[in-house]
Amino acid sequence: MKFLYYPGCSMEGTARPYGETIPAAAAALGLNLLPMTGWTCCGASSAHALAPAQARELARLPLTNGPRPLPVLTACAACYHNLIFAFHSAADETLSRPEHMLFQAAASGAIAALKKAVTVNIPLRIAPYYGCLLTKPGSLTGHPDPEAPRELQTILTAVGAAPVEWSFSTDCCGAAQALLRPETGERLTGRLLAMAQAAGAEALVTACPMCQQNLETVQFRRQESALPVFYFTELICLAIGASSANAALAKHLIDPRPLLRLRGVSI
């Protein structure tokens, strides 16, 4: 199936490692991503609070791509949240329905394609972390189990990793509170890191640029490097031997490569 790919601003900034691994990961999954030209910011993360009407219009624009619009795919949880809200708010049948790459990646056909492409297993105990925007509220996203999603676990298993079961996979990391109220953001993110470690995780994986940034930044600020935080596309690229994986991982605040080498993954 073809999708118009909406990258969002983070993919060219703080989430560059994510953006750099999306093309190879999509190819391995059998997802045909067509570049969206002339895309604009969706309004994340402050526009909705400052100018709600303008924010909805910003999020609606990427969904208007012709008389027979293609589905719009994004890999950013905040972008997806804004786009799906705009889609439902507009009640316009000509708009494309937005999709998140994670949900497409975990579909049975994509997983079957990924398993055929895997050449390297990733033997790590990894806690899947969805954050609070990706699946909730279910009334908007249509997710069948927004409080207990399983898509990341499905992908982890396909690349040879061991998913860690824990009770905080959809709890909030603090999001923009890391900037507005640093003590609140650090408390929420710190609790997630502590709970992941207590559950036996060696690393975390996410599909949200803000979550990844917060989870790494708190450890970096504390001068801790206990838990690398992967994007799910990076793990896919590692497993299929894509050259983009090493370059992406080198950009992390918490370098995952020593742990990977310790577990026998050449990189």
Image (cartoon, rainbow, N blue to C red):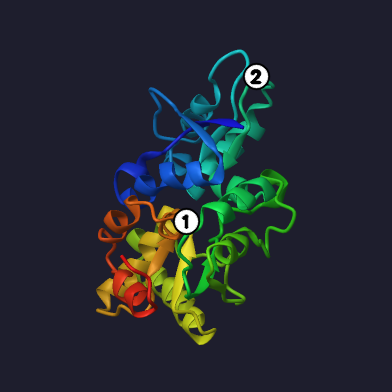
Q: Which residue is mark 2?
A: 94
Residue 49 position within the rendered picture, expressed as x and y whole percent measured from the top left: 46, 44
**Which quadrant holds the C terminus?**
bottom left
Residue 22 position within the rendered picture, expressed as x and y whole percent measured from the top left: 43, 45
Residue type at mark 2 is Thr
Marks 2/1 in contact by CB < 8 Å: the verdict is: no
Residue 193 position within the rendered picture, expressed as x and y whole percent measured from the top left: 44, 77
Look at the picture and state if 5 lies above or below 111: above
Look at the picture and state if 159 lies above or below 192: above
Look at the picture and state if 88 lies above or below 224: above
Kindly identify the residue that appears in the image at 55 percent across and 65 percent down. 156
Kindly identify the residue that appears in the image at 48 percent across and 67 percent down. 121
Between 229 and 45, the residue placed more toward the observer is: 229
40 sits to left or right of 141: left
Between 6 and 48, the residue placed more toward the observer is: 6
Mark 2 neighbour class, 10 Å CA radius: few under 14, some 14 to 19, many 20 or more: some
Mark 1 neighbour class, 10 Å CA radius: few under 14, some 14 to 19, many 20 or more: many
Kindly identify the residue that appears in the image at 61 percent across and 45 percent down. 104
Between 190 and 55, the residue placed more toward the observer is: 190
Q: Secondary structure at mark 1?
A: helix
The residue most toward the top is 67
- Measured in 3D between alpha carbons, the distance from the residue under mark 2 to the one under mark 1, in whole angstroms, is 34 Å
Kindly identify the residue that appears in the image at 57 percent across and 68 percent down. 169
Residue type at mark 1 is Ile
Q: Earlier in the sequence, mark 2 or mark 1?
A: 2
Residue 201 position within the rendered picture, expressed as x and y whole percent measured from the top left: 49, 79
Residue 46 visible: no
Nearer the camera: disc 2 or disc 1: 1
Q: Which residue is mark 1?
A: 236
Q: Secondary structure at mark 2?
A: loop
10 sits to left or right of 200: left
